[in-house]
Image (cartoon, grey):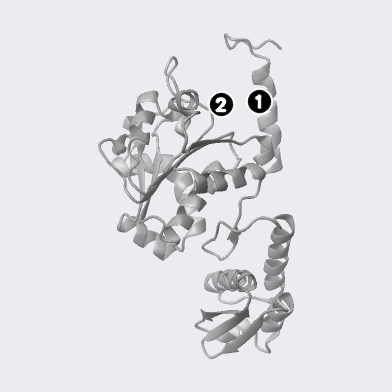
Amino acid sequence: MAEKVFEVQNPILFTGLHNELLEMLKNAYPNLKIVARGLEIKLIGTEEDILLAEAILEQMKHIIQKQGHINEVQLKDLLNNQKTVIFTQKDAKPILFGANGQPILAKTVNQKRMVQASAENDIVFAIGPAGTGKTYTAVAIAVNALKNKQVKRIVLVRPAVEAGESLGFLPGDMKEKVDPYLRPLYDALDDMIHAEKLKSYLENKVIEIVPLAYMRGRTLNNAFIILDEAQNATSAQMKMFLTRLGMDSKIIATGDLTQIDLPKKTLSGLKHAVQLLKDIKGIAFVELDGRDVVRHPLVKKIIEAYEYADSLKDNTGQNLS
């Protein structure tokens, strides 16, 4: 039996005026002893049950902070949603619990392969189309490693390359110029780390988010390094990036070989790495596809339509349909 104490500032908001919310929690976790006393809610039971109940309490806390209270309907929705996640992901353990207490899971077979590959290898390439959860899963793996003190810092990297744009034409200082390119990484972090903690991590460079060009000359020890949008790194940049790997560090590089925004006749560093490094022990490649799409259902259909169109093109890029 394990025990966990969850601290609260206003207990009645968690238990309900007549303990109706507390009774809902007890009914949801019949094998768990839940005791509300003073400014504490004590959870006694198996570690698995405690983690689940704690996740719900974290979500309740988030709602209470946002709107000043939580009602029975909202708690019921939280509990039902958690049961749905557990039912559909019976064999999946959470990578970690997010900022609002929601379990963050590898939701597809290939996302699970990413998690496993990172556990077994120091460098992982995750390759697949938009919406397959490459970046989100990679950030979750890195944040979990940081929380478990497996690494001392996280470095999130992106090439500042987009179709039809260049940094020089964007307004503002360098940070303002590169932030739009790094927004997906911020979004993932917002889901996984409480705002105040994340702010502290960023200010103290426990978590760094940097353009790829700023990586030259560095050696990163005891770090988890993620290269997002790796298809937009040149071959020389990819070599530079991979050789930043220091002792007790790991790398995940994510990318989509169908969305290369480099100038024509410039070889994608991701494509080159796939060809060059595929047989090296300690480096793993995970391919994701339309079956891994976890965005709106239409995204999967859009990807399939474009893949079909690409299959009709000849080697010159001309459409044969």
Q: Amino acid at mark 1?
A: Tyr
* Viewer-side residue, 9 vs 144: 144
SS under mark 2: loop
Number of callouts: 2
Q: From the viewer's perspective, is 257 left or right of 79?
A: left
Q: Which of the labelled discs sits on residue 258, or is there none?
A: 2
Residue at the (49%, 83%) spot, across then down: 9
Q: On screen, 72 above or below 248?
A: below
The answer for how far apart the CA atoms under marks 1 and 2 are is 10 Å
Residue 195: name its quadrant: bottom left
Which of the two residues, 251 or 164, is positioned nearer the viewer here?
251
Tell whether label 2 touches label 1 (CB within 8 Å).
Answer: yes
Kindly identify the residue that appears in the image at 65 percent across and 72 percent down: 49
Quarter of the rendering occupied by the N terminus = bottom right
Residue 110 placement (x, y as % from top left): 63, 42
Q: Is residue 35 left or right of residue 177?
A: right
Mark 1 or mark 2, which is nearer to you?
Answer: 2
Label 1 crowd (10 A; few <14 / some 14-19 / many >=20): few
Look at the image and tell me in which quarter the C terminus lies: top right
On residue 306, the disc is 1
Which amino acid is tagged 2? Thr
Q: Position of residue 203 (x, y in %)?
A: 31, 57
> Measured from the top left, where is residue 52 in percent x and y?
63, 69
Which disc is residue 231 wearing?
none
Q: Residue furthest front?
A: 281
The residue lying at 54 percent from left, 27 percent from top is 257
